[in-house]
Amino acid sequence: MQSSGLFPYGDQKFHLNGMHKAGDLILGGLFQVHFFSVFPDQSFTTEPQPLICHSFDLLGFRQAQTMAFAIDEINKNSRLLPNVTLGYSLYDNCLTLGVGFRAALALISGQEEHIVLNETCEGAPPVVGLVGDSSSTCTIAISTVLGLYRVPMVSYFATCACLSDRQRFPSFFRTIPSDAFQVRAMLQILKHFGWTWAGLLISDDDYGLDAARSFNSDLGVSGGGCLAYVEILPWEKDLNEFKRIVDVMRKSTARVVVVFASCFVPKQVVRQNLTGLQWLASEAWSTAAVLQTPDLMPYLGGTLGIAVRRGEIPGLRDFLLQTRANQFWEFTFQCKFAPAPSGWVEDGGRICSGDEDLKAVETEFLDVSDLRTEYNVYKAVYALAYALDELLRCEPGKGPFSEESCATLQTLQPRQLVYYLERVNFTTSFGDQVSFDENGDALPIYDVMNWLRLPDGQTKVQNVGDVKVSPFNGEQLTLDGDKIFWNFQSKKPPRSVCSENCPPGTRVVRKKGEPECCFDCIPCSEGMISNYTNSLECFSCPEDFWSSQQRDHCVLKQTEFLSYQEPLGICLTAASLLGTFICAVVLGIFIYHRSTPIVRANNSELSFNLLLSLKLCFLCSLLFIGRPRLWTCQLRHAAFGISFVLCVSCILVKTMVVLAVFKASKPGGGASLKWFGASQQRGTVLVLTSVQAAICTAWLVSSSPSPHKNTKYHNDKIVYECVVGSTIGFSVLLGYIGVLALLSFVLAFMARNLPDNFNEAKLITFSMLIFCAVWVAFVPAYVSSPGKYADAVEVFAILASSFGLLMALFGPKCYIILLRPERNTKKALMGRSTIGTA
């Protein structure tokens, strides 16, 4: 391997520090081996001095060594790229865009003398593919140029979602998930714990700004959350700006802080004693050892973060033990190779012998238990190797290029390698599948890390789950909740919401001028429900349903009608049956005493018909009690109307007979009785009743009464009632009864003073007075009574008028029959005047 003892001298053109190895095909690599770079002063009078990189990055160097190891392993594998030796040319980008860009241009243009394949410069281009860069900003700039020539670039750490744009970056691939998935992974964690109210801190670069855009657009869609604040962390040590950001965090009600930053310095958090926050770290710092110090643990302990997938690379540690690069050796053993800088020995410095035992020193360089970025480097190299292997196995005449040609080692063009990279698919020794989608992104997977605060104040970063995309199941978050350490007194996840969830039975009303997850909960109105959390609107219940007391589900409305089971219905039923029973008793008395004068007076047949009609009046009231049905609605008013007309017709005929008898008792009035014989009386009753029957028939045929569910009286009840159908028909029915009753009353009133010891006209007058009074009072009471009470009013009117007629007409007669039998004689009834019996 050609090397400069780790990057000590550079090219005269670009002054690039690199590490190289010759081969049939060369892979380029860009790594961060130094943290900082110093640009010399530009005097414009002499040739500029080369750029100086300092602050050795041990982990960046290990990543470069991992690429060297992967290529060495591939070269030893007889099944992968047989008879082809891979070489490499690796450069330090010094975490500077200008340096990384110069290195990339040098690699693809072939200006570096180390990577010329042969003296004739014929055959394959200097570098067929690049592994790198570690920075999204640098990668965007480099890949823009590489894409013009379709040189494949496989990044191991550039996560910007913008790099998935195939139009801008047609030859870019990566083995690390993009920030788009990183954002979705963190959103999965927020959603899992119900954190809908969070703050966001981002770095002032492409990494942070692009993540902020994705976070804003995806947060509401994924879990209904929103951001309390978004703050950009300054690169410079602007203490006032840091203090302002911490003040914002302190005043906010958000208990969760998401940090998308390539570096995060929480010194102000410590200075201002900002505790009680749950930190959610991006992969850029979720495993950063520099932050895992005892003084930061009271503030950062319990941090949850996502980290690049950890992998295992067998044999890497043994390879790293063979490293002898000068700068690495000096950094590890804190010595200098001779000749040492002046004053080094005098100040107590040690001279490196080169025989120091690397195994005896504790160094992070040899710790291969947590390989993450290195694992991505390893996969990137193997992806290029497998693509090259497929390319070189192409059979002439069956190739994918023009005229079914294949690429060869001598004619290989980078754009041909891109074709095979897009189709590469292999499984690592660790069991992870590697392939790229149409945007050049590998199947994404992240480990979920948790900062466990140990009793001695130290920190252990533990794996508590993972987030991955499965080809069949989509995005999946798996967490081991029992392992997670929460840095709170309750040892439970914190609550971080702007507004508590609106329970079922309420609806969300946004707070004006505040984010959408800040809202008030307004109860649903009566008859409306919301049956899930955070409902935006309430829904009306179906017609026969009503909202529950909690307004979270619909319940069947209560039904109301005049029932046999309720006290009012029981009383009315009892009264109806009592009236029927009394009618039956009176009828029995009259039948038993049918030969007595008081029964035979004024046509006993009419009295029997009157008792039967009263019995029907009492019984028809039962049709108004119980759940209305079609037949009961049709029958109740017809039965009521015909029964009462039969009753009133009998009374009317009785009254007319009284007047006719009185008139016949006068000289020359005997002829009037021939019109009021028994058959005429019977026929009159029949005709008058038939008219009512005709009215009822016409009413039922034209517009029949029917059951109806009325919801106007009560919102939460269904009142079952019978609608009359035709108001005119009902009015004519009642009016006809009223006309007959009024006529009976007038005639009876005229005959009240007739000379008779037992003048039935007085009883008829009194009974009709009760009857008319009841039904005159019925009309306004019926109209103003809602629901079942209208039926109760009608039943009461029927019973009251029926009892009135029964008591007024038959009470005195029964009194005489049962208690004063001496008055139940013809002589007693005739008195001084002689009135014939019909």
Image: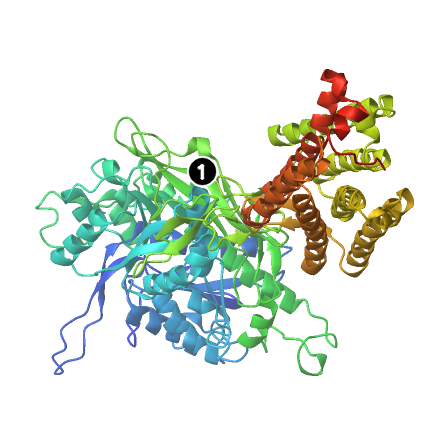
Location of residue 234 (image quadrant):
bottom left
Residue at image position (43%, 54%) is 224
Query: Left or right of 36: which side holds 491?
Result: right
User: Type of residue at label 1?
Assistant: Val
Is the residue 506 above or below the residue 442 in the image?
above
Quadrant location, the N terminus:
bottom left
Residue at image position (57%, 64%) is 437
Residue at image position (86%, 35%) is 605
Question: Given the current orientation, which residue lies at the most extreme front position?
Answer: 667
Of residues 65 and 830, the one drawn nearer to the viewer in this rendering: 830
Residue 293 % position (x, y): 24, 38
Is the residue 221 above or below the residue 644 in the image?
below
Element type where label 1 sits in the image: strand
Query: Left or right of 582: which side holds 503?
Result: left
Q: Which residue is mark 1?
A: 464
Location of residue 160 (image quadrant):
bottom left
Is the residue 655 above or below the residue 106 in the image?
above
Q: Residues within 10 Å of mark 1 (few under 14, many from 20)?
A: many
Question: Given the current orientation, which residue lies at the most extreme right position?
Answer: 679
Of residues 647 and 134, the one drawn nearer to the viewer in this rendering: 647
Residue 410 % position (x, y): 59, 76
Q: Is residue 496 visible?
A: yes
Of residues 324 and 275, the one drawn nearer to the viewer in this rendering: 275
Quadrant location, the C terminus:
top right
Residue 719 % position (x, y): 62, 44
Is the residue 348 above or below the residue 388 in the image?
above
Query: Left or right of 138: which side holds 613?
Result: right
Residue 517 % position (x, y): 37, 54
Of residues 732 and 455, the one drawn nearer to the viewer in this rendering: 732
Location of residue 368 (image quadrant):
top left
Q: Is residue 429 visible?
A: no
